[in-house]
Image (cartoon, helix red, strand yellow):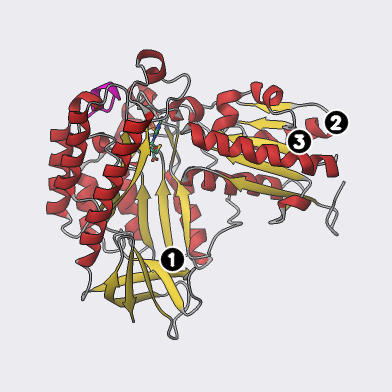
């Protein structure tokens, strides 16, 4: 078996999918570091390769399968190499994975990462190892994530796990289990450590952060059975956000993702009150048609969504707003699609993530609704949505030209070593020529030009 000089086995984690997966990989890495393994960027020469996977759309799963296929050669060269699958695909396919992808030795779902050292011992003695048990209270709150691929400036801090919303298209409630919130003490501890290590920005993470609710632990859905004392001393997202903003004045605070049904006025007023909370809200809408929202089991109407947008613009006038939209959901008519374009014209989002509907096995939509919008039409609608978003992005970014923005320098620009890049308050990427600044500095940048995705400035 390949080993490093200090005799530790080398592992590499390759992460796909959402920010939550990247955050989870840091937890898995910490667990392995504490159990005699050593992290390596060079997966080709590792003893253990872990793929942290995504199931959100079929394409995401196909990418993972392709990667696994490419490991066949590696395994032939190094018969001791072990391959593990973590995350949502592990949870969705369970033992089936071991049969379908013969090169997989280890399958671990998102709530079972503490068991990885035991499972690896099983693998060492030639057994296949699977743990996909979902938990009621696991939040990995006590685990200090190993920031193995971080820029040292901004970090993710996870505050909730799972999701109870059961949007009919979405596989997340099945792969990540029921929603639970993390102990605020451990959140504050993690942020303190990041501050002491020189980090300048955190992003609070959850499938649905606005629904954060700490009442001593346990599932969100069991809150109704909590004692009077637990209810009295419970902590909501707006309170948590304010607590962090007040205690970490020198840090920038972001959060994602917000679900329109759960975003409270209190969150908006806390955002407006504290300068260090970045003025950006990612507010997925999925569709501009009430008929489609209902079929998706989204718990709000377009009227309510627009009211929320108006409120955001009133309480936080300079707030950046972004979206997720799905095109071609079952039964989406041309008129429904037009309503999505209309909504986009109403909000004029700064940016967004746009997807074609992908039927996911096991979801309610896959059971009850026929995936009946032809591929060609899905694609055409997606193109129209992307084109409109580009127009809005370009127009919104143009508004910054001639003005000044505060930017946190994150790293050198990918395109030129003569430029820095970082994000402004509204989460828009800004690039500018280097002067005598360093990564981690908060600088005032005059915006001179823009594309539809980037602001170009000077200090
Ligand atoms: N609340 C979550 C949403 C996770 S999924 C969050 O933290 O962002 C991210 C986005 O993927 C969703 O908002 C939705 O727009 C898209 N998505 C989810 N399931 C999908 C599917 N079956 N087909 C296409 N897009 C999907
Ligand atoms: Fe998925 Fe809807 Fe939750 S999109 S993650 S079920 S809010």
Question: Ligand 1 lies in which image quarter?
Answer: top left
Q: Does the magenta segment cover residue 294?
A: yes
CA distance separating discs 2 and 3:
9 Å
Residue 42 % position (x, y): 72, 55
Quick one: 368 or 321, which is closer to the camera?
368
* Mark 1 Cβ inside 8 Å of ligand 1: no
How many angstroms separate mark 2 from mark 1 (CA)? 45 Å
Q: In the picture, which quadrant includes the C terminus?
A: bottom left
Q: Quadrant of residue 380?
A: top left
Which residue in the structure is indicated by mark 3? 120
Q: Earlier in the sequence, mark 2 or mark 1?
A: 2
Q: Please check the rendered image and state whether residue 191 is part of the magenta-colored stretch, yes or no.
A: no
User: Farthest right residue?
Assistant: 1
**In the displayed image of the protein, which residue is found farthest to the top?**
368
Whether residue 234 is visible: no
Disc 2 target residue? 125
First in residue order: circle 3 vs circle 1: 3
């Amino acid at each position: 078996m390949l080993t490093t000089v200090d005799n530790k086995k080398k592992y590499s984690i390759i992460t796909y999918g959402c920010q939550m997966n990247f955050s989870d990989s840091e937890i898995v890495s910490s667990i392995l570091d504490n159990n005699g393994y050593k992290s390596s960027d060079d997966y080709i020469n590792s003893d253990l390769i872990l793929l942290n996977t995504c199931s959100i759309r079929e394409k995401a799963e196909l990418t993972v399968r392709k990667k696994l296929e490419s490991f066949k050669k590696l395994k032939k060269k190094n018969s001791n190499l072990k391959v593990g699958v973590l995350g949502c695909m592990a949870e969705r396919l369970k033992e089936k994975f071991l049969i379908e992808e013969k090169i997989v030795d280890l399958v671990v779902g998102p709530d079972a990462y503490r068991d990885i050292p035991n499972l690896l011992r099983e693998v060492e003695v030639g057994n296949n190892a699977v743990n996909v048990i979902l938990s009621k209270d696991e939040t990995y709150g006590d685990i200090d994530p190993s920031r193995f691929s971080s820029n040292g400036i901004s970090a993710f801090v996870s505050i909730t796990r799972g999701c109870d919303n059961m949007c009919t298209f979405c596989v997340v409630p099945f792969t990540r289990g029921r929603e639970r919130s993390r102990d605020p003490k451990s959140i504050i501890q993690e942020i303190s450590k990041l501050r002491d290590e020189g980090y300048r920005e955190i992003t609070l993470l959850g499938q649905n952060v606005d629904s954060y609710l700490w009442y001593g632990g346990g599932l969100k859905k069991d809150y109704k059975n909590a004692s009077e004392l637990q209810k009295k001393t419970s902590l909501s997202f707006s309170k948590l956000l304010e607590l962090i903003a007040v205690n970490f004045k020198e840090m920038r605070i972001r959060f994602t993702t917000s679900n329109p049904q759960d975003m409270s006025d209190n969150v908006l007023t806390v955002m407006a009150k504290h300068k260090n909370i970045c003025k950006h809200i990612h507010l997925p809408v999925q569709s501009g048609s009430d008929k489609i929202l209902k079929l998706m089991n989204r718990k709000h109407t377009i009227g309510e969504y627009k009211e929320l947008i108006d409120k955001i613009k009133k309480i936080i006038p300079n707030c950046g707003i972004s979206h997720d939209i799905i095109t071609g959901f079952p039964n989406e008519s041309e008129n429904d699609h037009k309503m999505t374009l209309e909504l986009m014209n109403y909000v004029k989002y700064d940016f967004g993530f746009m997807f074609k509907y992908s039927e996911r096995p096991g979801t309610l939509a896959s059971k009850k609704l026929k995936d009946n919008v032809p591929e060609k039409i899905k694609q055409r609608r997606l193109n129209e949505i992307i084109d409109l978003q580009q127009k809005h992005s370009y127009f919104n970014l143009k508004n910054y030209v001639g003005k000044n923005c505060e930017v946190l320098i994150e790293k050198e620009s990918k395109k030129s070593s003569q430029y820095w890049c970082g994000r402004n308050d509204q989460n828009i990427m800004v690039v500018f020529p280097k002067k005598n600044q360093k990564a981690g500095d908060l600088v005032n940048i005059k915006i001179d030009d823009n594309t539809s995705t980037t602001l170009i400035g000077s200090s």
